[in-house]
Amino acid sequence: MAAETTIKPQTALPTKRIVSKAHLDAWLTSSTHSELVNFVEELNESVVGIKLSDEVVQSDVSLSPSPSRRWRAVRGLNQLHQ
């Protein structure tokens, strides 16, 4: 049986990357921006009507170590500025 590999996200110190109108325009028209906004909207919609005191069931899929499409948006931030 092959050994399992673990994907560890790379971390970096936050750095201001949008420093001009051109940078802002590039960000606002990027697919990464759209994906990030969609992700935040989906998160918002998923908790409408749920109280902090409500019990939340976590599925096995949400515990999976494999990267999801939502992380593509986060990784895309780095690609946009390279």
Image (cartoon, rainbow, N blue to C red):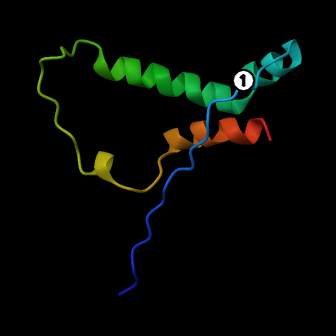
Percent position of residue 71, x then y: 52, 42
Q: Foreground: 57 or 11?
A: 11
- Left or right: 44 as drawn, with respect to 30: left
Question: From this viewpoint, which residue is outermost toward the right?
Answer: 22
Residue at x 12% of width, y 17% of height = 53
- Quadrant where the C terminus lies? top right
Q: Quadrant of the N terminus?
A: bottom left
Q: Position of residue 77 (x, y in %)?
A: 67, 35
Report whether 55 appears left or right of 10: left
Percent x, y of residue 40: 48, 22
Q: Which residue is mark 1?
A: 16
Q: Residue at position x 40%, y 84% from top?
A: 2
Q: Quadrant of residue 33?
A: top right
Q: How many marks?
A: 1
Q: Is residue 47 left or right of residue 73?
A: left
Q: In this picture, is 24 found above or below 81?
A: above
Q: Quadrant of residue 13?
A: top right
Name the outermost residue toward the bottom: 1
